[in-house]
Image: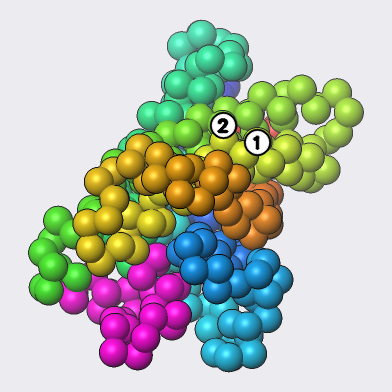
Amino acid sequence: MAHSVDKKSIPGYMMYINGGLAGMLGTCIVQPLDLVKTRMQISATTGEYKSSFDCLLRVFKNEGIFALYNGLSAGLMRQATYTTARMGFYQMEIDAYRNQFNAPPTVLASMGMGIMAGAFGAMFGNPAEVALIRMMSDNRLPPEERRNYKGVVNAFVRIAKDEGVTTLWKGCMPTVGRAMIVNMVQLASYSQLKAAFSNYFSGLSLHIAAAMMSGLLTTIASMPLDMAKTRIQQQKTAEYKGTMDVLMKVAKNEGVPSLWKGFTPYLCRLGPHTVFAFIFLEQLTQAYKHFVLGDDSESNI
């Protein structure tokens, strides 16, 4: 006898579409915080900004309010590639696990699925990641050194033409490494926290509570790798050889706390983005199930 869930399962392509849309909507809200985080990480050695708030004020004062959205097109492209791939892949993994074992994924299973989803998404999203970092940091360079990309497509074309196609995957290994850690913690913790909190919350409040805790845990775990990724993708000379080289040099020359430089804007960016992305994903999934499948059951994310 066939299970009803097989008749009303969400198509795989819709899992990818919903995942990408959720990430893009979240990015539109938190883009200024992502810019501040990137500027703080790049300027760590010069002490250009005293704090995240100082960075925010100076960008607003010296470059204008629209400068806070520098790199938005690249950020949206990143979500359209990286988040579409990782969220869609993870949802398909969860559905496959439930169909195979007729039970929710265990903690270890969720972590393993998060690692695979992160690596899968990062490979697709790295070109947009490179363009995003460069576009957000361009205004702080001397005028003669600025790249002045007109948009994400222009950035792709010029990078491929001037530096070679492989440059679009510059910093790919730290990006993949960071994505594996981020998704292992973020996706797995969200699934597990959602199940744990279900006895105390329901509906939207359950999604918010699980996403907030997931965002905090993810920030703590991934911050050093994010900092390494940013430095490698931004460098113009071969200052760093790889992720471990960045981590070792920063810890030695700037102190271990510098590995978490920009923690506040990163938390303020990743935390809300995690919350908004999961809320949008839950709502998009519920809407599809309700209006298309006629199913009002809770999602399995």
Residue 289 can be seen, yes or no: no
**Which stretch is magenta?**
132-158
Question: Mark 1 falls on what kind of element?
Answer: helix
Crowd tier of the residue under label 1, counting other residues whose Cα lies within 10 Å: few below 14, some 14–19, many 20 or above: some
The residue lying toward the viewer, choosing from 213 and 49, is 49
Q: Quadrant of residue 186?
A: top right
Task: Please tell me whether the stretch drawn in magenta is mainly helix, strand or loop.
Answer: helix
Are dots 1 and 2 in contact, CB under 8 Å? yes
Q: Residue 135 colored magenta?
A: yes
Residue at 29 percent across and 83 percent down: it is 145
- In the rendered image, which residue does mark 1 sit on? 217
Distance in Å between CA atoms under marks 1 and 2: 7 Å
- In the image, what residue type sits under mark 1? Leu
Residue 236 can be seen, yes or no: yes
Q: Residue 256 colored magenta?
A: no
Crowd tier of the residue under label 2, counting other residues whose Cα lies within 10 Å: few below 14, some 14–19, many 20 or above: many
Question: Mark 2 falls on what kind of element?
Answer: helix
The residue lying toward the viewer, choosing from 138 and 190, is 138
- In the rendered image, which residue does mark 2 sit on? 185
